[in-house]
Image (cartoon, grey):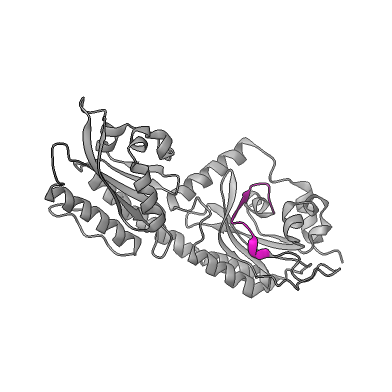
Amino acid sequence: MNRGVRFSAFIDLMDPLTTTDQARLEGEQRRLRLQILGLNNSEAEATFDRVARLAASFTQTPLAMVNFINDERQMFRGMYVPTASPDDKADPDGGGIVFDLSSVAREVPNDYGFCPHVVAQGSQLALDDVFDYPRFKGNPLVNDMGVRSYLGTPLRDNTGMILGTVCVADTKPRVWDRKIREGMQELTETLLADFKLRDSLLAQQQELFAVFDGAPFPIMLTEGPNHLLRYANGKQGAAFGMVPQFSPGRMALPGLESIGVFNAMDEAFHTGRAATLPRAQISTYDVPQPQEFSFLCTPVRTSPGAPISGVLTVAMNITGQALIGAEQQAFAANVQERFERLGSGGVAAAFPGQRV
């Protein structure tokens, strides 16, 4: 029997990666959802690495991934690969580790591998032997890593949107029987709890934003190493300019870039510790004379144990002041504490004199 034949009719009749307006729209919607969840990058995360290890162990495969896919790229936030020995050899039947998979990158283009097909068709894809499919045989995944068999399961969030896949692959042909396919489906569904938790913490963030909207200082929340603007209160827009959501901060806010604010944000993001720019002068939109500000940059997480996902930056106007006032210091400290509580899964305490 020709392994994988049970899927050939479907695959040959339909190319789910054909570029259409609907496909582009769905990709953009996935990117927006991933941005909201703090998952729109390829940084490793322990929760997803654990699921990848479980998938590899359950299926006895050398390669497993939790793969998030937007409209431009695939991001392996969860990955399991073996460490190949120099003595490992590829045998004539395709068995064994053909390449040192330990060097696999955590980010690839959307035309790489088979996961984009799983997302496009919205159902599990099992390829018992990739060589049975001429259109898949020349895929870079086959050429770069020697993959001969693949099983991908759609990864849905708690809203039902497909965000990517949980997949396994082997360097030899495999028969993905019903038990394995169902087991992978069940394992994939365990991630629903993580997505629900992220949404819960995001809801708490929205409550904080309602407080920040009336704050006396400019406040912004950015996402990722490129500091995409996720939130800005009215004071932030009035002082430094209104910009579209998810705009790259350095490009959208050149004034803040020129005085070194984004360097402090880089420090907070990469070290996981609060960073400050004690004093910097900048021309603002709401006051004709240049003003002096102190900036506090606090790293934030979207779920307990997750890597740093963004930076909350509070700007305090200290024009004419030798030191930051006690009220300003207390407010900044409360901002930092509340976001640290959210990142650890705790409930943030209210600001003095305010209800959330």
- The image quadrant where one finds the N terminus is bottom right
Residue 104 at x, y percent in the picture: 64, 59
Residue 85 at x, y percent in the picture: 70, 72
Of 167 and 315, the residue lying toward us: 315
Q: Quadrant of residue 88?
A: bottom right
Q: Does the magenta-highlighted stretch encompass residue 107? A: yes
**Picture residue at 68% right of the left edge, 74% below the top:** 60
Q: Does the magenta-highlighted stretch encompass residue 57? A: no
**Picture residue at 65% right of the left edge, 56% below the top:** 123
Tell which residue pokes out farthest to the top in this image: 288
- Total numbered circles: 0
Residue 38 at x, y percent in the picture: 44, 52
Residue 82 at x, y percent in the picture: 65, 70
In this view, 227 is above or below 195? above
The magenta stretch is 101-113
In this view, 192 is above or below 332? below
Of 12 and 305, the residue lying toward us: 305
In this view, 100 is above or below 120? below
Judge left or right: residue 27 versus residue 309.
right
**Picture residue at 82% right of the left edge, 64% below the top:** 3
Q: Quadrant of residue 167?
A: bottom right
Judge left or right: residue 292 versus residue 10.
left
Judge left or right: residue 239 versus residue 152.
left
Of 157 and 64, the residue lying toward us: 64
Judge left or right: residue 340 versus residue 2.
left
